[in-house]
């Protein structure tokens, strides 16, 4: 079994981020990059598989609630989404296991799409614009991953804009407030803030509903105990939980 903690031979990787890409995240990244490249060659794919409430309700294009997560509007869009997925998702996958992490990722992504669909038919000022808008990107699911990270590592510093260290729990509160305010304002900047907010809400409800497997949590605790016990002998970095005040995420 591969250790969930970086060894002394990978100090550079652990100092910059969480370490090597885990299996589920690797598969998600490959799928996103492949879809991005195909969409560059055949732009019509974005219109057919991006999330557009008018198409879902009017033409029953239900596949869009899943496929929109694999499409992106530009190189920086996909780059930042995949970077955030790696930085905040790797430790969660190591803790939960690949199967549950993948399930959580898709639940939050589909839940984010459902939030957009519901809001697009409600009697709210921006509903009509949302109904005919096109939403693409993994941001809804990534926001769900960030929410889970903040719940498990609430005091882990996150460097906002790469300069200002903020505890993860407050960082999520800030971006949640920004998404909420942006979703009800005219200054949306073309970003699907309602989808971001949906990813946060669905992720919170899913985790608070006790869906994380008890066995996975117990296994994590056991491995942490074993590694801490051998720490002095093998010089293994303990890391991994909310009380880890010395670790940094850049």
Image (spheres, helix red, strand yellow):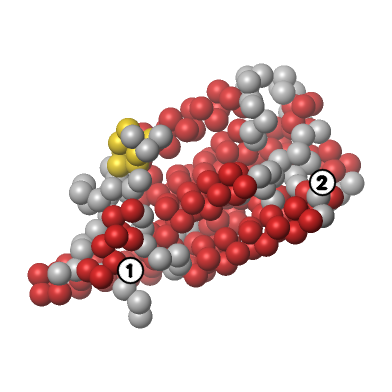
Q: Are marks 1 and 2 in contact (CB under 8 Å)?
A: no
Depicted 193 relative to depicted 222: above or below: above
Depicted 124 relative to depicted 232: above or below: above
Q: Tell me what residue is drawn at x 62 percent, y 39 percent.
A: 195
Circle nearer the N terminus (1, 2): 1
Q: Tell me what residue is drawn at x 29 percent, y 60 percent.
A: 12
SS for tag 2? helix
Q: Nearer the viewer, residue 234 or 146?
A: 234
Residue 66 can be seen, yes or no: no
Q: CA distance from mark 1 to mark 2?
A: 40 Å
Quadrant where the N terminus lies?
Answer: bottom left
In the rendered structure, the answer to whether residue 169 lies left or right of residue 190 reads left
SS for tag 1? loop
Which one is in front in this view, the residue at disc 1 or the one at disc 2? 2
| Residue matched to label 2 | 47
Depicted 104 relative to depicted 122: above or below: below
In the rendered structure, the answer to whether residue 107 lies left or right of residue 21 reads right
Count of number-bearing discs: 2
Q: Nearer the viewer, residue 110 or 84?
A: 84
Q: Tell me what residue is drawn at x 40 percent, y 49 percent.
A: 149
Local crowd size for mark 2, using a 10 Å CA cut-off: few (<14), some (14–19), many (≥20): some
Residue 161 can be seen, yes or no: yes
Image coordinates of residue 115 in percent, x first then y, are 65, 39
Image coordinates of residue 69 in percent, x first then y, are 66, 51
| Residue 38, disc | none
| Residue 4, disc | 1
Q: Residue furthest right?
A: 59
Q: Nearer the viewer, residue 136 or 128?
A: 136
Q: Tell me what residue is drawn at x 60 percent, y 56 percent.
A: 106
Image coordinates of residue 166 in percent, x first then y, are 32, 35
Q: Quadrant of residue 77?
A: top right
């Amino acid at each position: 079994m591969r250790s969930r903690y970086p060894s002394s031979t990978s100090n550079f990787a652990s100092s910059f981020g969480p370490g090597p890409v885990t299996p589920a995240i690797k598969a998600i990244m490959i799928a996103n990059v492949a879809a991005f490249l195909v969409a560059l060659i055949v732009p019509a794919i974005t219109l057919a598989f991006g999330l557009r409430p008018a198409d879902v309700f009017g033409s029953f294009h239900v596949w869009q609630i899943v496929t929109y997560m694999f499409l992106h509007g530009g190189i920086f869009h996909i780059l930042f989404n995949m970077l955030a997925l790696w930085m905040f998702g790797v430790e969660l996958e190591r803790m939960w296991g690949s199967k549950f992490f993948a399930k959580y990722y898709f639940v939050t992504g589909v839940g984010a799409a459902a939030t957009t669909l519901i809001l697009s038919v409600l009697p709210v000022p921006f509903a009509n614009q949302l109904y005919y808008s096109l939403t693409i990107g993994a941001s809804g699911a990534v926001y769900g991953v960030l929410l889970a990270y903040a719940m498990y590592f609430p005091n882990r510093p996150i460097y906002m804009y790469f300069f200002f260290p903020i505890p993860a729990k407050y960082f999520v509160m800030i971006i949640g407030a920004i998404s909420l305010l942006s979703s009800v304002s005219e200054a949306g900047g073309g970003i699907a803030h309602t989808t971001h907010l949906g990813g946060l809400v669905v992720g919170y409800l899913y985790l608070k509903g006790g869906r994380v497997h008890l066995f996975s949590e117990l296994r994590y605790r056991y491995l942490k105990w074993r590694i801490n016990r051998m720490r002095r002998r093998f010089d293994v970095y303990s890391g991994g939980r909310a009380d880890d005040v010395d670790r940094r995420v850049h």
